[in-house]
Image: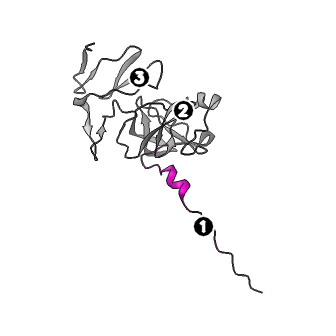
Amino acid sequence: MNHPRIVLAIAGISLPSAPRGATLAATAGRSARTPTASATSSPATSSAATATAPGGTAAAPASIATIHTVTAMVGGASETVLVNSTGLPLYFYKPDTATSSKVSGELAALWPPLDASAPIAHGAPGVLGVVHTSNGNQVTYNGHFLYTFADDTPGQVSGQGVQNFFVATPGLMSLRTVSAAPTTMPAPAARGY
């Protein structure tokens, strides 16, 4: 089936028309598909709108990436943070491991997991992954499962430090590196007798 294309002259980009059940939102020169039913669908890319990242992998523009970066206020300071395709800040949960999300039930209703079967990033140099959990195909960044916060709005970070969730940044240390770091114990102090 041939899909008509929507041309955004102001932003100078064109995207295929939004699939049934999705809306196209445009703000400040950016556009993003906003699924109305489920966040598990993977974003579509147009070869004309896709650049090539180092290493030969495709890098999507922020408008259609699963994850991109913005500058937001975090604890009174301006910081670059990871956001989803609709601009909601992304968080990681301290108790999670690289292979297991500890967020479910009521906690997952307040902190919805980021789901995508083929996530793509723009402006975030970390490693993206997908782990199938009871929450679906959960997206990871440097081994950390990612979540949004029900009280946030695009560009607003209000969940920092709440219930052991912390805002994700492009330089988020790899969870595998953190958990694999050797633990050293200080030498016992010499006792003088």
* Extent of the magenta region: 168-193
Q: Main secondary structure of the magenta part?
A: loop
Disc ID at residue 184? 1
Q: Calculate the distance from the C-alpha at mark 3 to the C-alpha at mark 2.
A: 17 Å
- Image point 47% across, 18% down: which residue? 37
Question: Considering only order in the chain, which callout, 3 or 1, is on the residue closer to the N terminus?
Answer: 3
The quadrant holding residue 122 is top left
Dot 2 crowding, Cα within 10 Å, few <14, some 14–19, many 20+ = many
Residue where numbered disc 2 is placed: 149
Q: Which residue is identified by label 3?
A: 34
Q: Earlier in the sequence, mark 3 or mark 2?
A: 3
Instruction: Give the residue drawn at x 40%, y 17%.
Output: 22
CA gap between label 1 and label 3 equals 47 Å
Residue 84 part of the magenta-drawn span: no
Q: Amino acid at mark 1?
A: Thr
Label 3 amino acid?
Thr
Local secondary structure at mark 3: strand
Q: Are marks 3 and 2 in contact (CB under 8 Å)?
A: no
